[in-house]
Amino acid sequence: MKKYLLSLILLMSFSYTAQATDCEIKYNLKGWSAFFKTVKGSGVVSCSNGQSANVNLSMKGGGFTFGSFNIKEGTGRFSGVKNISDIYGGYFAMDGHAGAGKEVEGRTLPFKAVKLSMKGKGRGVNLGFSMGSFRISK
């Protein structure tokens, strides 16, 4: 019985792993904040199964946040993706940021079973923290 159960668990984990797809995003973002934060940008998502898509990025939120920034050539990695259509939707976003000339950003965004980790560099003058919704659309 134990061997049967162990075999079943291994088979289930293998079939889940076989369905998972690695996806990356390369993006540019531009935004500003004065208690309210708004960000817009675009990116290209490419997956290990050959799927790719041009996407629009936006974020709206608020908090104790002031300034503006421009991120160029940011990168990100998705986990939990079975099909490229899984990436579209609104992710919960919470971040802290600071910049004076050079800007560095990093965030991890959960959405259902999908998680997106992003990092980028650019220019900006800003300070604060915020929460909101980060949206990926076609």
Image: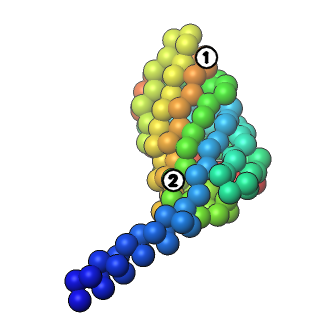
Q: Nearer the viewer, residue 39 or 110?
A: 110
Q: Residue 102's spot in the image, x, y percent?
A: 55, 13
For the residues bearing labels 2 and 1, Cβ distance under 8 angstroms: no
Judge left or right: residue 89 versus residue 3: right
* Residue located farthest toward the left when viewing the structure as drawn: 2
User: What amino acid type should be assigned to the residue bearing mark 1?
Assistant: Arg
Pick the residue in front: 6 or 124.
6
Say whether disc 2 or disc 1 marks the residue closer to the N-terminus.
2
Residue appearing at x 59%, y 64% in the figure: 82
Q: Nearer the viewer, residue 93 or 106?
A: 106
Which quadrant would the N terminus be assigned to in this image? bottom left
Q: Would residue 62 be seen by someone viewing this image from the given angle? A: no
Q: Is residue 111 placed above or below 23 in the rendered structure? A: below
Residue 14, compared with residue 35, is above or below; it is below
Name the side, left or right, on which 83 lies relative to 9. right
- Give the farthest residue toward the top: 101
What is the C-alpha distance between the residues marked 2 and 1? 28 Å
- Element at badge 2? strand
Q: Quadrant of the C terminus?
A: bottom right
> Which quadrant of the figure has residue 50?
bottom right
List the residue tagged with mark 2. 79
Q: Which residue is mark 1?
A: 123
Residue found farthest to the front: 3
Identify the residue shown where x is 46% and y is 21%: 98
Q: Position of residue 100 (x, y in %)?
A: 51, 11
Q: How many marks?
A: 2
What amino acid is at disc 2? Ser
Residue at (51, 59) in percent of width and height: 80
Q: Which residue lies at the image location 54% right of the left edge and 66% below the top edge? A: 18
